[in-house]
Amino acid sequence: MRNNRWFGWDGAGDSLWAQSVRPILDAREMGGSQAEAAALIRRDPELSCRFQKTFGAPPADDEGVFAGIGKALAAFQETIVSRRTSFDDFRDALEKGDRPAAARYPLAAQRGLRLFVGKGNCSACHFGPAFTNGEFHDTGVPFFIPGGVDPGRHGGLKKLQANVFNLIGARNDDRSGASTVKTRQVAIEHRNFGEFKVPSLRSVAQTAPYMHNGSLATLADVVRHYSELNPDRLHSDGESLLKPLRLSAEESADLVAFLESLTERTSALQPRRPSAACRR
């Protein structure tokens, strides 16, 4: 999450902290406002104290407080990382030439991995440690929504450029200006219409439903979508690399087994004790 370049299915966020406040304002989610969020900080003595200790000033203007809320949320989210998976163990075993350890990786997942990088060509977009190229593509999922269409990246770029919390804005703490380059250079193009973010596949078995609109309930549904892809659903600027995979039932099950192996092993987390810095 913290290593993303763009945030949200439409890429309307250019930082994790700017993305973090979107759900607060979105009428479809929390339906709040900057004023309400800032008032919550001010009327809670401990939150107000913590805000001042963190940002060096009391929670004054609503916009500044709201930006601080986003940065605090982002600081927490940056601590959330994917833990080791059975695939990681398999990859490391191969690198070390440890055949016994590699053999512990399920055969179905091994076959699925071959499909992922071979016939399925999934690795064209899902590669690297996070299994994503971080970009936006049209994958043939309908972008029609009640009352219109979801423009995807095309609309997200418009939101990004209009957002007072983008990295070009006054609330960016980076005084060097280095972080603003990507936002200054990005341009809206017709091909961006109907493109959506390529998600990380880390812990993908735990992130249902799938696709930008949540239209697919299971990983098996996702594999079926690409297996039976209708090329006519791709718009004229769609990805030429996409084509129906025509997977057999066994191949589909193997690919799902591989995807499931990208999910971290469960472990008990020790709760952290709250700081007493602002306790009375």
Image (cartoon, rainbow, N blue to C red):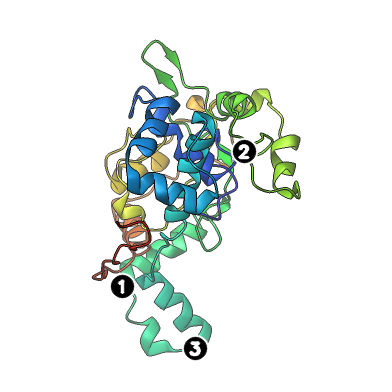
Q: Secondary structure at mark 1?
A: loop
Could you tell me the amino acid type at mark 3? Gly
Q: Depth check: give the residue in front, 144 or 269.
A: 269
Mark 2, other Cα within 10 Å: few <14 / some 14–19 / many ≥20: some
Which of the marked residues, 2 or 3, is nearer the chain's N terminus?
Answer: 3
* Mark 2 vs 3: CB contact within 8 A: no
* Residue at 42% from the left image edge and 33% from the top image edge: 38
Q: Earlier in the sequence, mark 1 or mark 2?
A: 1
Residues under labels 2 and 3: Cα distance?
50 Å
Identify the residue under disc 2: 171
Left or right: residue 180 compared with residue 257 = right
Mark 3 crowd level (few <14, some 14–19, many ≥20, 10 Å Cα): few
Percent position (x, y) of residue 12? 55, 33
Outermost residue on the top side: it is: 147
Image position, residue 93 (x, y; %): 45, 83
x, y (%) of residue 142? 43, 25
Q: Is residue 226 left or right of residue 61?
A: left
| Location of residue 100 (image quadrant) | bottom left
Q: Nearer the viewer, mark 2 or mark 3?
A: 2
In this rendering, the label closer to the viewer, 1 or 2: 2
Q: Can you say whether 269 is above or below 37 in the image?
A: below
Image position of 202 (left or right of 61): left
Q: Is residue 66 above or below residue 116?
A: above
Q: Element at badge 3?
A: loop
Q: Which mark is residue 97?
A: 3
Inspect this view and state whether residue 131 appears.
Answer: yes
Q: Is residue 172 above or below residue 278?
A: above
Q: Residue at x 75, y 46 (%)?
A: 177
Callout 2 amino acid:
Arg
Say what secondary structure mark 2 lies in. Answer: loop
Q: CA distance from mark 1 to mark 3?
A: 17 Å
Indicate the amino acid at tag 1.
Pro
